[in-house]
Image (tube, rainbow, N blue to C red):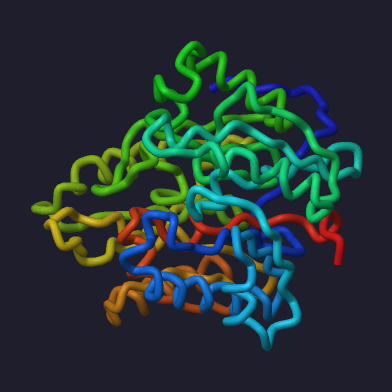
Amino acid sequence: MIMTNDVNCRRLPAEWEPHGGVILAWPHADTDWAPILEEVSDCFENIIRAVAEEEIAVVIAPDTSIPQSRLADLDNVLYVTLPTNDTWARDFGPITLIENGSHIMCDFRFNGWGLKFPADKDNLLTRGMTSAGVLQGIYRNRLGFVLEGGSIESDGQGTLLTTSQCLLSPNRNGEMSRDDIERYLTRQFGLKKVLWLDHGYLAGDDTDSHIDTLARLAPGDTILYVGCDDENDEHYAELASMKCQLMQMRTLEGNPFNLIQLPMPDAIYDDEGQRLPATYANFLIINRSILMPSYAQPLKDELAAKILKIAFPDHEIRMIDCRALIKQHGSLHCVTMQVPREILPI
């Protein structure tokens, strides 16, 4: 890891810091959601309703009349008419940092998780929202570097947690070495320390092991991570190695992190027998609540909720059934991107 003691005026906030809105892209018939459009629309509606109780829900859609008809009773929703390829706002939305007291919206390039899927429309969404006046912070073009919001975790104090499998993917920034990428991120976000996980994956994941499916930073130098206690499960060895690596990591002060293990949901398969990437690590932190994905597994769901409450004692833990989302290999955090209140027009 590269560390810097330089005083830097840039800071990448932690997700648990106060924010004012959450961006979501509504599923539509021209996306891969078409076969289960009503089912996944129900899930999106549930997420938006939960967000709108505490913050502004920014809903993008090619035809906003569709979500508007379902959410007509809500006042705390801002609709944006823009074309989209898909719905994974975490990865194409702006990554917002604070610099000299101003909010900077960094627009990194989104290339469909290493050229796996079309992303030409989604890659334009941050610029489109800015041009439309929906996002009113300072726009910063960072389209020369591929970076997805789901691939990084910040503690707000200069520590970043990420995975080498994703950030070192040859189809993202393949011309850059690990040190090159670490220097770039350190400069862009004012970092003091970058922590790399070299182990851990979820079957069915298209993202090359996004950190938000495996391990999440929390207040009090805490890391919540996915564990697997079943030696017969295909994830057992990799997640055990991930745990060992987490145990070796140190905070800026040189102390070990407070590690809290999240359970792994029982295996869920699609119609072709492919295991889907169900994970409780893919939760969203909003101002007063944790929106936690659930998978109709009462014992595991309740256990995960209780564990999250330990890490976030002042937040209400609210479950949202995300079985629809994992059918396209993502979950709740993947379809959301938080933004500060200061950059929104209402």
Q: Is residue 159 left or right of residue 340?
A: left
Compare residues 158 and 259 and report the one nearer the observer.
Answer: 158
Q: Residue at x 74, y 23 (%)?
A: 5
* Residue lying at the far bottom of the rendered structure: 73
| Residue nearest the viewer, comparing 43 with 164 | 43
Q: Is residue 69 visible?
A: yes
Residue shown at the point (63%, 26%) measured from the top left = 185
Q: Position of residue 63 (x, y in %)?
A: 60, 64
Q: Is residue 213 above or below residue 186?
A: below
Q: Is residue 247 above or below residue 28?
A: above
Q: Residue 2 appears at what percent x and percent y?
A: 59, 20
The reply to whether residue 315 is visible in this rendering is: no
Q: Nearer the viewer, residue 95 or 214?
A: 95
Q: Quadrant of residue 224?
A: bottom left
Camera-side residue of 237 and 301: 301
Relative horizontal placement of residue 270, taking residue 303 as reference (left or right): left
Number of numbered discs present? Answer: 0
- Give the residue drawn at x 50%, y 52%: 88
Q: Is residue 172 left or right of residue 94?
A: left
Q: As drawn, which residue projects farthest toward the left?
A: 232
Residue 262, located in which quarter of the rendered image? bottom left
Residue 260 x/y as whole percent: 42, 58
Quadrant of the image containing the C terminus = bottom right
* Residue at the spot 41% in from the left edge and 70% down from the top edge: 40
Residue 320 screen position, x and y as percent: 45, 76
Give the side of residue 222 with respect to residue 203, left or right: right
* Location of residue 165 (image quadrant): top left
